[in-house]
Image: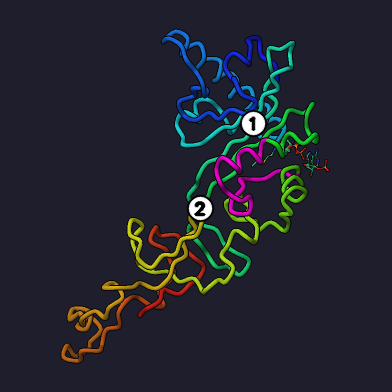
Amino acid sequence: MEFKFNVNDIFKQPIVEINNNLIPPGFSGDRRALWDTLGKVSEVVNTMGEASAVAQGLSKPITTAERLRNSEHKLYFLIDQAANNGKGAVTGMLKTGNKGLYVFDRDGQHYQVTPPCILDFYIHESRQRTGLGKHLFEHMLQKEEIEPVKMAIDRPSDKLLGFLNKHYLLNSPVKQMNNYVVFDGFFPKSAEPSHVTESKPSGNLGRKESANGLQKFTSPQGRYGAPRPPCSMGQIIHNQTTNNKNQEPTGVKSLPATNYQGVHLGGAQIVSQ
Ligand code: ACO
């Protein structure tokens, strides 16, 4: 993608990373130069976002300067510094970011996870299938120190699924209801049954984490797992004597399964200790 201005003046490396401040790496200059640069970076983001949306058949872009400014996402741009008579051209864009998701594996086990995600990926039509996508993707993997299989992908196109299959042998996607896709290696290898507990989102109780931030719900431990004293009000309501110390079980069981955010989880059991 060529622009009226000199791309090499604002993007000084073959791959540049932009975040929500929109300031390209290596920028130096006064306030006026900064405003000028921000305007040009915004134009690149919006133009590439628009082209990506058209290539994917989307009704509107998912990548805009405005949205980037209000996010924690990262944008990687691929630059052909020799193109356009030495003024440079932007040939690719890759957007990543962490998203809080509920994902299900093939057995229906559910996980709360905040993995790095592929959110938008585009190589200019004139350069597709020449290895540029792999080049940009590899750069991102190195920078983010992640394996492709540990990432979730937002609404992948057939081209992207073909790309992931060809370069990373990722096939048989596990499609999620939220339109994200993950692959089998995303989940831990020896899956224990997943349980829903009453643990709070802010606490670490009863959780396990893996490299991609995967959290699986397990039984509560420590003082939260200890037997509770009988609740006399509960026993009165249920017409039970209050002097039987073992009347009330700890925890909650056999309720319609919801997680702590109130999402229905299809009959999963809430476990009691
Ligand atoms: N049809 C089918 N497969 C394709 C196509 C295509 N038109 N283009 C790329 N691929 C896949 C194939 O596996 C291809 O290998 P092959 O040529 O041997 O069949 C492989 O990608 C090529 O690898 P690269 O050259 O490294 O990839 P490329 O530079 O083409 O970038 C990308 C891949 C980003 C998917 C690019 O094709 C593109 O921009 N497509 C249009 C936009 C798009 O679909 N983006 C992904 C949206 S989903 C999301 O962003 C989360």
Q: Tell me: residue 63, above or below residue 102.
A: above
Instruction: Specify whether 124 is left or right of 107.
Output: right
Tell me if residue 75 is in the magenta stretch. Answer: no
Between 15 and 122, the residue placed more toward the observer is 15
* Residue 245, image x, y percentages: 20, 89
* Residue 223, image x, y percentages: 26, 73
Tell me if residue 151 is in the magenta stretch. Answer: yes
Q: Check disc 2 and report the residue beneath it.
A: 101
Q: Tell me: residue 70, above or below residue 165.
A: above
The numbered dot on residue 93 is 1
Between 134 and 226, the residue placed more toward the observer is 134
Quadrant of picture, ligand 1: top right
| Residue at (77% x, 28% y) in the render | 125
The type of residue carrying mark 2 is Leu
Q: Secondary structure at mark 2?
A: strand
Q: Secondary structure at mark 1?
A: strand
Earlier in the chain: of badge 1 and badge 2, it is: 1
Badge 2 density bin: few <14, some 14–19, many ≥20, Cα 10 Å? some
* Residue 21, image x, y percentages: 45, 26
Question: Start and end of the magenta stretch?
Answer: 136-158
- Residue at the top extreme, as displayed: 32
